[in-house]
Image (tube, grey):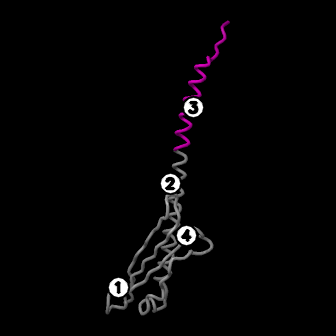
Amino acid sequence: MKRKTFSLIEISIAIAIFAIVSVYVMRILYQGYHYSRGFKMKTIACLLAQEKMEELSTDSDSTLFSNPSAHNESRAQVDSDYPDFDREVNVTCPYLGNNNLAHIKVTVYWQGEKGERSVSLQTLIADF
């Protein structure tokens, strides 16, 4: 009875094919991780900007329209729960003579793998 065994060349070819396939699979997994982390950071930044927008738009304080610069915030860390994010708020009343319309711009910054990233949300709020 003849025993069927694999030769050294066959084993080497199988190992090479396995290594090539493994490299491509690892590359795909790394890219997936990289993109999911980027999307996560951008989503958190959008939610932080939206949270500040809602806070300003539902604020019953009438100084939003009479003294918009009182609501401006220079770039600073959002809070201790989000140490990787900075936020900047700019409130203006761009239309002279019409003090019941405010322009709000909220920008959130974070450090990405390729440098600083940011998301800006803008809206107009009316008080009629």
Find the magenta span and give its range: 1-27
Q: Main secondary structure of the magenta part?
A: helix
> Can you say whether 14 is above or below 126 in the image?
above
What separation in Å lies between label 3 and label 1 (alpha carbons)? 64 Å
Give, as a three-letter code, the residue at label 3: Phe
Q: Secondary structure at mark 4?
A: strand
Are discs 4 and 3 less than 8 Å apart at CB? no
Q: Position of residue 25 (x, y in %)?
A: 54, 40
Mark 2 crowdedness (10 Å alpha carbons): few <14, some 14-19, many ≥20: few
Using residue 103 as the reference point, say whether residue 79 is left or right of it: right
Whether the magenta-drawn stretch holds residue 41 is answered as no
* Picture quadrant where residue 11 is located: top right
Image depth: mark 4 or mark 2 in front: 4
The residue beneath circle 2 is 35
The residue beneath circle 4 is 85
Q: Secondary structure at mark 1?
A: loop
Q: Residue at x 55, y 38 (%)?
A: 23
Give, as a three-letter code, the residue at label 2: Tyr
Q: Residue at x 44, y 81 (%)?
A: 90
Considering only order in the chain, which callout, 2 or 4, is on the residue closer to the N terminus? Answer: 2
